Amino acid sequence: MKRHPIITGVIALVVILILWAVLSSGGRDYEYVAEDASKGEVARVVSASGTLRALNTINVGAEVSGQITAVYVDFNSPVSAGQLLAEIDATRPRARVTQARAQVDLARASLAQAEASITRSLTDVQVQTREFARRKELAEKGFVSTAGLDQAENALVAAKANLSSAQAQAQSARAQIAQSMAELESAQLDLSRTRIIAPTSGVVIDKLVEPGTTVAANFQTPNLFTIAADTSRMQVEASVDEADIGQVRKGQSVRFTVDSYPEAEFEALVQQIRQSASQNGNAVSYLVILDVDNSDGRLLTGMTANVEIITGVKKNVLRVPVASTRFLPREEDRGEQPEGGEQSGEAKQAYVWVPGEEPYLPRRVPVKIGLEGEEHVEITDGLEAGQAVLVRSKSLRGDGSGEGS
């Protein structure tokens, strides 16, 4: 004490203050904390977590195999419909086009030959028809033998057969042309597909290839780019627990935050409630789609959203803290007053504790509560604005003990 008189005096003063607080409270080392019933807003919310997605994302793939020779866009590049995104080596598709054109030309040449044969055969048929008719007339007058008539008839039959053969060759040539044209169109289509074109305007949010990358489209279309068609509007895919999904309705207001902007609160609307359930262990949840305005561009795809769906709200109503409807004074301070509550009509019967004439003799008051929010509860009957209600007990020891209900 002689060495540290100041420290000793401070410790003594603290001890005296603690003793005074204990003695002034009738020997109790705690006190009750009250808050006033007030007018304000009561909101009932359903909490969930979700992920931000672009409203309309398009995967751009390759329908032909080959090596990427050039890439003209990068992450976050704005693109317009029809813009060239990348190119695949076109050597083989171009060779196929050349080969298919040659086949078309060859088939057309065959058709020309067949048509020329038809023309010759028609002429020959006409000549042999006239010759057979002349010899037949002479045979009837006895100037031509039967053998001569047979020879003319055979020549006519041969000419008609040659005509039929030429016509068949022409038909085959036409079919060959159609087949070659189909192969040419297929080759030209594959050649055009070596140029990867943006199907719509938007922003490139994912790029999976670089020059030199080889893509194989033998079994499925490989994805090269992902384009967000419109980032001014986005959606949140929120997972809502089955216990809360019954309160969620289309068109309800939503507020949410993201870790990137912890001080900012964003607004959304419930757009869709998916009926298909997701199960993770014993937990069952449902996907709720939220419509979000992102005209300022701050929100990005993939961000985690901490969602509060407002399932009910009342403004300018009498309210008390939720803790007051759950609070119980210490057993020795309750006296003979009964505990608990019961249902009564549409409003729920409950009880709150209010300060009594003595600090440690609180009085229980029956109240009817309406909308229950996370922080406040609506009081429809039993209290008046400004009336104090007990919310917790507070320790007077200064060490944090004695806190709670």
Image (cartoon, rainbow, N blue to C red):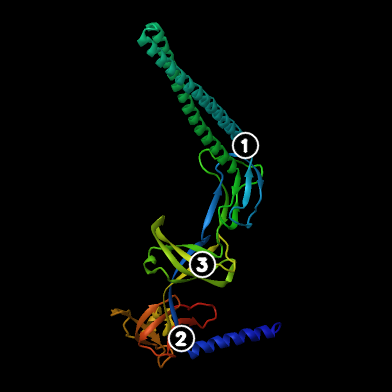
Place of residue 347 in the rendered image (x, y in percent of width and height, measured from the top left): 32, 80
Question: Which one is in front, 17 or 381?
Answer: 381
Residue depicted at x 56% and y 65%: 232
Do residues under tags 2 and 1 come within 8 Å of each other at their CB atoms? Answer: no
252 on left or right of 115? left
Q: Which of the two labelled residues, at mark 3 and mark 2, occupies the earlier sequence position?
A: 2
114 on left or right of 136? right
Q: Which of the two labelled residues, at mark 2 and mark 1, occupies the earlier sequence position?
A: 2
Q: Amino acid at mark 3?
A: Val
Place of residue 197 in the rendered image (x, y in percent of width and height, measured from the top left): 59, 49
Element assignment for label 2: strand
Residue depicted at x 67% and y 83%: 7
Mark 1 vs mark 3, foreground winner is: 1
Residue position marked by numbered label 2 in the rendering: 34
Q: Which of the two labelled residues, at mark 1 and mark 3, occupies the earlier sequence position?
A: 1
Residue position marked by numbered label 1 in the rendering: 94
Do residues under tags 1 and 3 come within 8 Å of each other at their CB atoms? Answer: no
Element assignment for label 1: helix
Q: Amino acid at mark 2?
A: Ala
Question: Which one is in front, 159 or 260?
Answer: 159
Place of residue 17 in the rendered image (x, y in percent of width and height, measured from the top left): 56, 88
